[in-house]
Image (tube, rainbow, N blue to C red):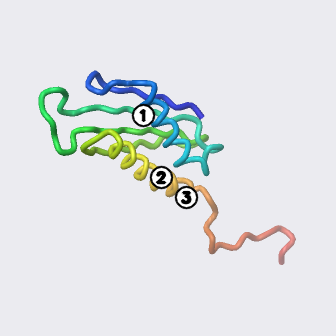
């Protein structure tokens, strides 16, 4: 599973931040690790250096599940940690929903050729 992390000019992209984001993604999506090929994370400060805002840190995460279209979510929060975790929670719900749609319905009966 490849994880790409980018930041804008207002957020320092340190090794500590990169390792933190990777660990959080690996922990949150370990159940689906074999079905995910790529994560792309982008962190930005929408107000920049000019002023502080209530929810000015934005985290966008795009995931590429194997054989499916990419899924992207955004979350804004007052700090990097809350923005990351908010985006992860949104992505978990979207990914679970996508994977559930791929499975046969639980109530349906599978008929075999020799059943008659």
Q: Nearer the viewer, residue 18 or 73?
A: 18
Residue at left 17%, top 32%? 47
Can you identify the residue that label 2 sits on?
92
Q: CA distance from mark 1 to mark 2?
A: 14 Å
**Residue 12 picture location, percent across and down:** 33, 24
The answer to whether the residue labelled 1 contacts the one labelled 2, judged by CB atoms less than 8 Å apart, is: no
Question: Image height check: is 49 above or below 29?
Answer: above
Question: Image height check: is 55 above or below 89?
Answer: above
Residue 101 numbered mark, or none? 3
Sequence-first tag of 1 and 2: 1
**Residue 88 picture location, percent across and down:** 43, 47
Q: CA distance from mark 3 to mark 1?
A: 25 Å
| Farthest-out residue, front | 16
Q: How many marks?
A: 3
Residue at left 28%, top 21%? 9
- Label 3 vs label 1, nearer the camera: 1
**Residue 45 picture location, percent across and down:** 25, 32
Sequence-first tag of 2 and 3: 2
Mark 2, Cα crowd under 10 Å, few <14 / some 14-19 / many 20+, is some
Can you identify the residue that label 1 sits on?
41
Left or right, residue 95 beside residue 73: right
- Label 2 vs label 3, nearer the camera: 2
Mark 1, Cα crowd under 10 Å, few <14 / some 14-19 / many 20+, is many
Disc 1 is placed on an element classified as strand
Residue at left 21%, top 44%? 55
């Amino acid at each position: 599973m490849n994880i790409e992390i980018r930041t804008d000019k207002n957020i320092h992209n340190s090794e500590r931040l990169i390792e933190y984001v990777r660990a959080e993604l690996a922990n949150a999506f370990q159940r689906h690790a074999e079905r995910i090929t790529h994560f792309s994370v982008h962190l930005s400060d929408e107000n920049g250096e000019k002023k502080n805002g209530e929810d000015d840190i934005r985290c966008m995460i795009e995931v590429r599940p194997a054989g499916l279209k990419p899924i992207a979510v955004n979350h804004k929060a007052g700090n990097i940690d809350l923005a990351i975790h908010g985006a992860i929670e949104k992505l978990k719900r979207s990914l679970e929903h996508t994977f559930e749609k791929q499975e046969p319905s639980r109530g349906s009966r599978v008929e075999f050729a020799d059943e008659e």
